[in-house]
Image (cartoon, rainbow, N blue to C red):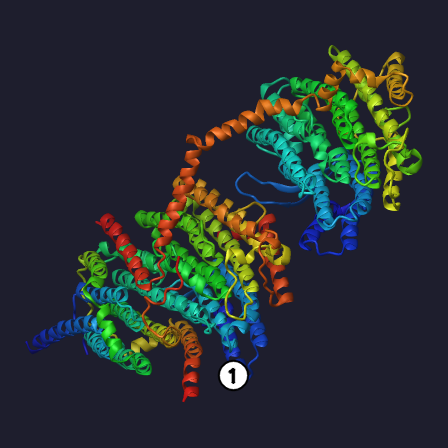
Amino acid sequence: MGGLQIPMEQVLALAGLLFSCGLLGLMLRRNIIFMLMSLEVMLNAAALAFVAAGAKWQQADGQIIFLLILSVAAAEVAVGLGLVLQIQRRFKTLDMDQARRLRG
Amino acid sequence: MAGIWLIPFFPLASAVLLLLSAGRMPRQLAAWLGAGSVGLSAICVASLVNDFLADGQVREVTLWTWMTVAEFTPRFAFYIDGLTVVMMSVITGVGFLIHLYSIEFMWDDESICRYFAYMNLFVGAMLLLVMADNLLLLYLGWEGVGVCSYLLVGFWYRDPANGKAARKAFVVTRVGDTAMALGLFLLFTELGTLDIQPLLAAANSTWQVGDTLPVLATALLLGGAVGKSAQLPLQVWLPDAMAGPTPVSALIHAATMVTAGVYLIARTSGLFLLAPPTMEAVAWIGLLTLLLAAFAALVQQDIKRILAYSTISQIGYMFLALGVGAFASGIFHLVTHAFFKALLFLAAGAVIHCLHHEHNIFRMGGLRKRLPVVFWSFLIGSAALAALPFTSGFYSKDAILLSASEVGGIGLWLWAGGLLGALLTGIYSFRLVFIVFFGQAHTEPDRQPGWKMSVALVVLCALALAGGLLALPLADVFPAARAHEASHAIEYISIGTPLLGLLLAYLMFLGRQINFDRAADSIAGRRVRGFLFSGWRFDQLYEVLWVRPYTTVAHWCRNEPVDRVYNAIVASSQWAHHKLAALQTGELRWYATSMVFGLVLLLAVMLRNAT
Amino acid sequence: MRKRGGAIMMEMLFYIAAAVALLATVLALSRANAAHALIYLIVSLLAVAVVFFLMGAPFAAALEIVIYAGAIMVLFVFVIMMLNVGREGTAREREWLGGRNWIAPGILSALLLLELMLALRHAPAVTSGVAVTPKEVGLTLFGPYVLAVEIASMLLLAGLVGAYHLGRRFIVRRERRR
Amino acid sequence: MNATDFQAVLPLLVLAIGATVLMLQIAWVRNPGLTAALAALVMALSALSCRLAAEVAPTEVTPLLQADRYSLLFATLFGFAGAITALLSRDYVSLHGDEPEEFFLLLVLATMGASVLAYAIHVASLLLGLELLSVSLYALIAYPNKSILPLEAAAKYLVLSGAASATALFGFALLYAATGALGFTEIGQGLTVTTTGQSVLLPAAVMVFAGLAFKLSLVPFHLWTPDVYDGAPAPVTGFLASVAKGAVFVVLLRLFLDADLFRYRILVEITGLLAIFSMLAGNLLALLQTNIKRMLAYSSIAHMGYLMIVFMVSLSGDSQALAVEAASYYLIAYTATTIAAFGLLTLISTDASGRENVQLQQVSGLFWRQPLLACLMLVALLSLAGIPLTAGFIAKFYLVNAAVSGHNWILLFTLVIGSSIGIYYYLRVVYYMTRRPEEHRVEQKIISAWRGRILSGVLIATILLLGIAPQPLMHYLKAILH
């Protein structure tokens, strides 16, 4: 099955858009679950860019990096969500604006 | 001998151990560790001396090169020749005796641990100073002994006066040290090395006798030497430094550290020989200092201050010797002086110790029978100090006076001055003996010196008596001295002068044939006495000349522009700190935002430059 | 002609998928309700999977669906269900998403986007149009990248142990309370 | 993969196998002492196995890893640092959280991540090493889950570090799109013959740099540093400050060298700019800080700034070798010093309440109560301040020398200013430590008396040795890096 010839700048632009959205979410949300989601979006954007580049050079490497990013995301989310549970238990809130005992 | 590095290692390691124990070591252990480490060093030195006297070989030991960055390769290396061996023997030998003595002297002090830590540190630093193969390591030892001196003068820091004395000693010697550091920089930039032997060789090949640069360099080094050795015009700190425990005065402010200046000049004698004007200055400084200090010693009442002035005076003799090119004689006097002055200080310490910390000689008296060991020690020490015949001091001082007399031109003046000094030395040293040990008792001793003190005193007595017979292995170090061809007249005068001083002292202070008191109590006499008592009013002079203008300027600056600049720096740093710290809100969203902001900024810079 | 028509359709599909991905992402990140947001995020991931497929990366597309949209998002679902933030939680989220909070983040991400677009504006290349088959991926993965697989296993171990340690006490406590 | 390849990655293999063994051991029997000892042993073995690996160096093991003297040097360093951290934290972890065993497993994994970074010459290995390190650190930071500060710190670090990783990855993706290469060297070669527009290259490179600069906490990506340092358990902070930063720096330098990014002057100038900001801001922020952990955090910002000088120095090819040498020496000295400083904080925080004794008042008079530990801190602080006869002095001297040879006067000037500010706040801690205990009565008992003492002795000796006799290491660095 043949793939589609898509202009690179458009795929990369999509990746850039998703990346910026992720950052926007990161800056905007106070709830740590949403922050983790934003993180996922950013990682996904990077993965998209890798796959696109791999498709451009017709190499398997892009997809392999994607695979690695996938495992990275999985590991980060696993630890991150474990942390969320603890935060909910200790702080009684997920609002990261409340968690600012460390400062100065 | 392979383990040369052990010699400074023992005291340094012991100092580290003692410091680390932070005063919790049992005093028995602390004391014996402190004294024992120096003893071990002394044994190593003895073995080294033995080897050295057998083969006379100069030993160069490179422990390691500190680092190699560009041409700068400072090394931890030792250079052991006759001069070094002599100095090491004095430091460890006399040092060990004083440590032994200290065990008893300091036994009741709560900070005995700290005391021995500082003392060991001092011995280690002093050994580094004399063993150093390069001027950088020498400077390290130089500063090390300075710090130890500061710590030990202010050892009883609870009394603010002691702290003040310590500060004075430190500040005054810093003045000299700064000059010396400048001298080192000058030498390094001009000659490209700080290793002493290559440096002397390079100096000899690049400079002619009488060039300006060697004069300048040696003058700067002389500044350091003058500060450390308490010579004119930086002699003011030494009498006050007597605030420390007496064994400290014996070790640091009489036997070893204060002679570091003499050592420095002797060590770099090759350089000084290229600068005749500096040599002449050294001689004159020595002469003036020895006279000035001798006069001041005549009227003091504190037993330790008298000895302090006599130390300044005797170091003046050493400078005089160096200045006339009789380096070996100077070092010889350094050695004998170390013996008899340590003896005198320790004996004085014993008196003070046994008279519950009485310092004023007019409240002593009649101790001859009550403290016999101390009396004989003191008597022998004074005899050596006054250079009575057949004591060690006689041989060394005689050599100096002979050398001075043989210099053409100014030599006669130097000789006459030295002779006057010798007369005065005889008077003040026996004034001390007569007042303290004869006549009426004013204070009763409450204890007798124990065996540790007595052993130290007896051994030093023997050295003070017989030290003049030592033949120091200095022939290869210095240019050969001319053979003395002094006329008998000069010999007799040299022998007779101290005896005359002894006689005068007897007449004035014991026999009362000359009524010194009446002369002294007249108005003019009192003036003169006050003048001399204050050490020729140098403190007052410096107060007016330096301290007061300095504090005035400092006061003036407190609210004035100079200070405002400093305040502004501090204030702006603090302002910046608060502004920056205000960014640390602890708010995660803000942190993320700032990161994105940074990223946007960096990308903007890139895009600007990429297109 | 038919082939070309197919290509045009595929191209359309790409743009649609891209639009869906973008829209779903924006919605996901601006929802107040976490469960809703999660659904949008899954949609976005599915759309990205379509893009992968269209670019000739069927293996990546499959993994995106199975692991990303499937496994990882399910983790989120679990946690959201466990915490059960509830109605007032949603209301609070909505309050936090009020107007002023958007200003600085909005400007900054817009600037970033602008800069990325500026950087990408001279990128004339196109994707190759030839699919990289799962077989090729597999061969490369266990060829030059074999060590990456091993290290990734260690990475997952770290994630596992970390999550176990952090989550464990929470679960234990819950059980005890019952 | 053949026998040579296995030998070349032996340090990594030891860590991986060790991690597996540890896991099995924990499953079999829970015993913190045993686990800690095993973990320390594994990491020390890994460090020692670098000698074996050096026999076949340089070898490229698959396109991902490069075993050469440079990578092995730092793998050794990280192995030893990890081992010391494990020993230091043994009692701390038992006291501050239940189930202490996994801590050591995570520590081994984090050390492995750092070692992978030392080996990395490829985007894939960089990504995996970075994330292995970071993910282990998230869990390590949050480990004492009795208290809330570690949780807050871990959450902050996780979110921000994840974003930074994503940024760096996005940058790499753009580079890949432009060059078609993922190996550092190949990226460098691809940069000249790129087909996609040149305009994307520098922004992509700067995104990579920004992502890594976050991990190095360079200004303006530094805000997280004090909070995370403060909240994390002291031994983890030590590891984070020394090994994690060192590993990232190592891989960043390798990337710049292999891909020859030094040809882009503007990129290097940006590193210099961040270096200047970091030196100034870090020192100013530390100035009036009364929490020692935060003070050290700010000072680490400054130290990373000092270290970044080598990038500017490397601009001129002549001084590149000297710059790398200086950086290596600096990293080694800095690692020993940092572990020593945080080691002290580990040893004196024995409160069962989970509080750490990190305020200035809490070390008041330490010298009179715990002279050896106080000496540890003293030596560490003097070294950080760059006082002669400590490792820090030689390291700074090296840097200054490199800067002089590269004629980077502005950087040098900032370095001097920063260092002089630094002396103030380092010596303030010393001042507090030497205050008489009468003035400030703080009781703290010290855990792990003998182990703590031995470790303190080893660390003091290391720092002093590196300062008094640095010559052997200097020679070694010269030999392997030229």
Number of numbered discs overlaid on the protein picture:
1
Residue D190 screen position, x and y as percent: 29, 58
Which residue is at the far left?
Answer: C1
Q: Nearer the viewer, residue D103 or B88?
A: D103
Q: Is residue C49 left or right of residue D4?
A: left
Three-letter amino acid code at the position of disc 1:
Ala
- The chain letter for the residue carrying disc 1 is D
Q: Position of residue C93 (x, y in %)?
A: 24, 72
* Residue plotted at (50% across, 58% down): D359
Image-based side of B270 in relation to D419, left or right: right
Q: Position of residue B337 (x, y in %)?
A: 80, 30
Q: Quadrant of the N terminus of chain D?
A: bottom left
| Residue B266 sits above or below residue B118 on the image | above
Which residue matches tag 1? Answer: D27
Vertical position of residue B562 compared to residue B416: above or below = below
User: How many residues crowd mark 1 within 10 Å: few (<14), some (14–19), many (20+)?
Assistant: few
Q: Quadrant of residue B431?
A: top right
Against B300, residue D261 (above or below) is below
> Can residue C106 be seen by looking at this rendering?
yes
Quarter residue B405 falls in: top right
Q: Nearer the viewer, residue B369 or C99?
A: B369
On screen, residue B355 above or below C90: above
Q: Secondary structure at mark 1?
A: helix
| Residue C28 picture location, percent across and down | 22, 73
User: Outermost residue toward the bottom?
Assistant: C178
Q: Is residue B188 left or right of residue B12?
A: left
